[in-house]
Amino acid sequence: METYDLHEAARSGLLTKLPPEVFTPARLSARNAAGNTPAHAIAKYGGLRLLPAELRNRALFTLRNDSGYTPLHHAALGGHFDEVPPEFATPEFLGLSSNSGYTVFHVAAAHGHLDQLPPALVTPAVLLSRTHLGNTVLHEAAENGTLDRLPPGALTPANILERNLGGETVLHVAAFNGHLDQIPRALLTAAALKELTTAGDSVFHAAAISGHLGQIPPEFLTHEHLVIASKTGFTVIHAAAETGQLSQIPRERLTPDLLLTRNDNGDTPLHAAAFEGHLDQVPAPLLTSELVNARNYVGVTVGRTALTRGFAEQLPPSVRPRTPGAVGKLLIRLGLARPAF
């Protein structure tokens, strides 16, 4: 009998070109170098209906690859769960978990195909079932941007605050991955956004660190919330400055005292902006001599940081630092003078 690559045929949509005798239990369960079987590839790319009915059985659908995923997981991943016979769309089979604790529900939610599973089985308990990392089905949807494909009423004030092993709520995961805009506005309360992870990061931190501060309702971008510090002293405003998110903060809230907030190293948000080249997001009237000359705990000013990092041109000419001359450099090196900036 001619040799066929069932993996490639599944990927290429060529299964219909193969003779029926090719589909045998031995061939469907043979693993490739990645530990996947043709049964997994066929389920992922939509070819389960092409298999003989007698092969679409318990042995096939409980077959595990090296990561512990079954063809049911792969059908949910590829959006072809509608090809799975109804007798295998039950809590028993959908609850099968991978080596990392991912059930078919987790995979379907992550890839936006939860609607292909029987609605009656997507219960509140299922939505809060956890992987080995503590991620619920909602966390997986939040990470992958499929929160808007969850069943109506799936997101509640209580379940969006469920935590994984790192203490991240569903809101933290959504904010970090840029999907906070899929959370109903009524659920984005100040209290929920101030919830902290194990490391002390708020949802504000997650949004600022990942460059998605613009998804936080602007009325919550207040001084109180922007100076929340993590356990390492890293504040939201420092994160915003570092990632170029200062422009997302309403202008009237971007005040001198906010920009002089210090982290545990004594750096201000302006130091962070100067280091990463984001001083151009600070309104020019705020770049006064006082703020540009602010020093951290080792005596380095905002101006000096901008100069050494090559971003001095982002400062107004009146406060832009100048490189010391030869004599000045010598005096500084000998410890007889301190840099002006």
Image (spheres, rainbow, N blue to C red):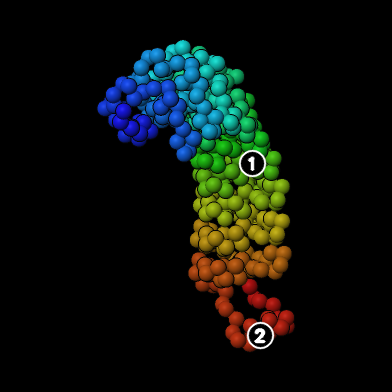
Residue 329: mark in rendering: none
Mark 2 or 1 closer to N-term?
1
Q: Secondary structure at mark 1?
A: loop
Q: Is residue 35 left or right of residue 272?
A: left
Q: What is the x, y in percent for residue 98?
A: 56, 29
240, 172: nearer the viewer: 172
Q: Secondary structure at mark 2?
A: helix
Estimate the spatial distance between the alpha carbons at disc 2 and disc 1, rounded to whole Å: 46 Å
Q: Are marks 2 and 1 in contact (CB under 8 Å)?
A: no
Q: Which residue is mark 1?
A: 202
Q: Is residue 55 left or right of residue 63?
A: left
Residue at horizontal 69 percent and vertical 64 percent from the top:
296
Q: Determine crowd level at label 2: few under 14, some 14-19, many 20+ residues with C-alpha closer than 10 A.
A: few
Can the viewer see residue 7?
yes
Image quadrant containing the N terminus: top left
Please name the amino acid that badge 2 sits on: Leu
Q: Which residue is mark 2?
A: 330
Residue at horizontal 60 percent and vertical 51 percent from the top:
239
61, 247: nearer the viewer: 61
Q: What is the x, y in percent for residue 295?
A: 68, 66
